[in-house]
Image (cartoon, helix red, strand yellow):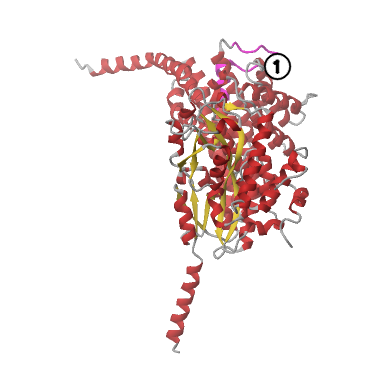
Amino acid sequence: MNIKIPLLLWATSLSVGCAPVIGNATGGLTTNRVIPQAVLYGDVTMACAMGEALSPLITSFEEESKKARKSSIIAYLASAICAEQRVQETELGRLRALHGGDVASAKDQHALEKRQRMVAAGRYLSAFEQTLVSYGAVEEGGACPKLRNDDEEFQYLMGMSAGVLAVLHNNAVGNQAGDTSSVPGVVLRGAPCLDSDKWWGAPLALESAIRALLPGGSQGTDPWASFEETARQGNAAGVRLASAFYVQSAATMGDRQALEAAIAGFLAAESPPEDASRWQMLDNYAEALIVHQSDLIWTNETGHRTPFDALGTYPDTVQDTEPDEFVDLLDDLTGP
Amino acid sequence: MSPTKILSLGVCLSLASTAFAQDKNLCVYDPAGAAGTVFQIAQEFQIEAKAKGESLKLIPYTDEATAAADLTAGQCDAAMLTGVRARQYGLPTATIEAMGALTTYPLLRTTISLLAKEKAASLSLTDSYANAGIYPAGSVYLYVRDRSWTQKSDLAGKRIATLDFDEASKTMVDTVGASKVPADIGTFAGMFNNGAVDICYAPATAYSPLELYRGLTSGGGVIKFPLGQLTIQVVARRDRFDDTFTAWARTYAAGKFSSSLSAVQRTEAEVDDKYWVTLPEESTSSYDSLFQGVRVKLRDAGVYNGTILKLMRRVRCQADAARAECASSPE
């Protein structure tokens, strides 16, 4: 008897039957061990590399495993951060080239920037879509999703954030990275399902970001007042995501005054409470977003990014010398 | 002359002019060498100087005496040295580190800023050397093995690690009746930590790298009254750098005060809170008076520059006109 065929059938049924088990194990391991450790450790670049490496593994079990689907939200988001970092560098490269008058290089960087934005938008959109698959989209007048614990609330918050970022990147490439037209509405209805006080003001800041971006989106509310309050909340909690959304929105709207105020608030934050350290990566990511906005200003005006340790200063306000009113102290000390 | 010889002469002349455009050596004293914060400041300065037409080659030195010797010998075209070491070049700006003269960073910033003004240029020049920038390196404090030693009288008879080349410190130690124990930058911390001396003085930035907490143990303290301000000064040879460049460099350095200071203050924050000893008001006045006396003595001995002392007094009185010295002073 040819034993190969039964063996083959047995192996196939085993692997098909095992997929949900392996998927649950992989998803569970990712959610319960890998992600908390990455968030605690705080290294954004390492986390994004983890996302790029793990996404294919985790998402291969999306069909069979709820846990894998849920953990893929963070995996996609983390991998999107890698693409976003590449977007940021090409954006600065474009501005540097422009400042130096190198038109060919500016065009080259611009083209590369858009390609990277496509990737970033696509990954953020995948994270957002997985959130909707896992938890559902809140309909007009509908109920909030059932979020059973902090892990699920965190996934939901990250998923909503990914949606906002997908919109920003997709807008910049003429909406070629996918359909993000329904994202603003879903985020506006979904973000309030989270306790903004518990999550460092970030859910409300997300809402404000959408309202500030949409024409007529404010609907009688003042997103800028909301940004100030949620940024204060996040800064005090030591997880300054709300500040990052504030800075990003101010930059998008061209409000330099609001942007500088938001950065000043970010920098003035007191030492974080001890429990903030478990979210270190989020705070570091917020800082990276804010530093990038500062880099854009500096590169645009000087051709180089923010000098090291100079976040909160600007090219036109770097003067550190005392005003000339003290020059009279030199009278008759220095000869004719 | 044949065309070939003319051509050869032309080539030789152009090669010679290329040789004059080579880098100038900026010797950088930093205890941590090329990995230290002073070297980082130098790297930023190098970039900005390039925009001004000066190509600098940075050479790290972990031994300050050697850096100074190489500057004197002409191997360095300029050097970044502490103010106390820069004194040997006769630059009045070295007096900015005078004992007790500037007890806060705002006072230091004002003074550096004023010295960078065109009106003060003569105070940054000697026949051979120019000051090309002053950077803050931290307030200097007394580290004592017994935190109750807060009065001037408590210092009498105590053993104090004293830098050999620092006339100001030697005079101060003599004035309070303490014993000088010769030391240098590489040995003073070990002497304090193992109890060979009772007291040493150092910037707060030395606390962690030199593990001065070992010498403080449980009963010691850091007297929260700056003895003076340590600075890093760029001393440039005037036969290598023109006065326009060094004037620009002074202004550049003054403009970098905050960013230079922030690195210092981050390190100062590492001093354990429990070690700081805040002096009562009467002790502060007593130390003020002691240091003024030391400054005058050193001025009269030619160590401190009198014009700089006068300027710093004006800066102190501009900030606080109620000071006793503002009514009358021997400075």
Front-most of residues A248 and A286: A286
A305 to the left or right of A43: right
In the rendered image, the residue lying farthest to the left is A1
- Name the residue tied to disc 1: A140
User: Residue sitting at 65 percent across and 15 percent down?
Assistant: A195
Mark 1: few/some/many CA within 10 Å (<14, 14-19, 20+): few
Secondary structure beneath label 1: loop
Which residues, given as a range, are shown in magenta? A126-146
User: Residue sitting at 59 percent across and 54 percent down?
Assistant: B48
Front-most of residues B45 and A78: B45
Magenta stretch encompasses residue B81: no
Location of residue A278 with respect to B104 vertically, above or below? above
In this orientation, does residue B256 appear? no
> Amino acid type of disc 1?
Glu
Label 1 marks a residue whose chain is: A
Location of residue B32 with respect to B299 vertically, above or below? above
In this orientation, does residue B152 appear? yes
In the rendered image, the residue lying farthest to the bottom is B1
User: Residue sitting at 46 percent across and 72 percent down?
Assistant: B15
Front-most of residues B280 and A256: B280
Q: What is the quadrant of the C terminus of chain A in the image?
A: bottom right
Residue A200, how many percent across, how many down?
64, 20
In the rendered image, the residue lying farthest to the right is A220
Residue A172, how many percent across, how many down?
63, 38
